[in-house]
Image (tube, rainbow, N blue to C red):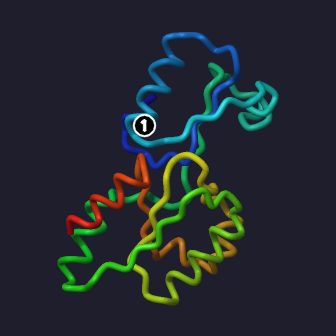
Amino acid sequence: MEAMEAGRDIDKILVRPGLDSELRKDVVDLAAELNIPVQQVPVEKIEKMVRGATHQGVVARIALVPFVELEELLVSVQEKGEVPLLIALDQVSDVRNFGAIARTAECMGAHGIIVAPQGAAQINAEAVKISAGALHHLPVARVAHMQDMVYLVQSY
């Protein structure tokens, strides 16, 4: 909760099945508000991730690259006087494909990548490696729904 409230860039929230508590409800509600995907995973996976540390059945994966707000990205492109070239990735779940697309997008002069919180590949070390570092230079915006993104982009 603290990481989300502090504005940390979180890739995904992992929750153990059967966790029915106020904490789970609060985490899931805030994650939905912030467009952060939530996934149920076996408690063994959480145990492996935390390596013996105390947990409450909830783990956050911190993103390797910061996410930007789509509106901020559009404004920054508009301030440059350029026509935005944005790559919208819907349901691209393979990190190698994600990295390769990011690498190509940067080479083509794209201003950013847009992803939805559900069904998107993780931006992990492999994605960054495959992108040849492009993900460190190309802004990534996460939007709640792709159809809403289309309406927003058209308004700029």
Q: Up-down: is 67 above or below 9?
A: below
Query: In the image, what residue occupies the spot 61% across and 26% down?
Result: 58
Please state which of residues 38 and 155 is positioned toward the viewer in this rendering.
155
Three-letter code for the amino acid on which mark 1 is drawn: Met
- Residue 57 sits in which quadrant? top right
| Residue 25 spot, x, y in % from top left | 49, 18
Q: Which residue is mark 1?
A: 4
Residue 71 in percent (x, y) is at 26, 60
Q: Whole-percent x and y of residue 87?
A: 46, 72
Badge 1, how many Cα within 10 Å: few under 14, some, many 20+? some
- Give the residue drawn at x 62%, y 32%: 59
Residue drawn at (51%, 45%) of the image: 10
Q: Quadrant of the N terminus?
A: top left
The quadrant holding residue 80 is bottom left
**Count of numbered circles in the view:** 1
In the foreground, 100 or 129 = 100
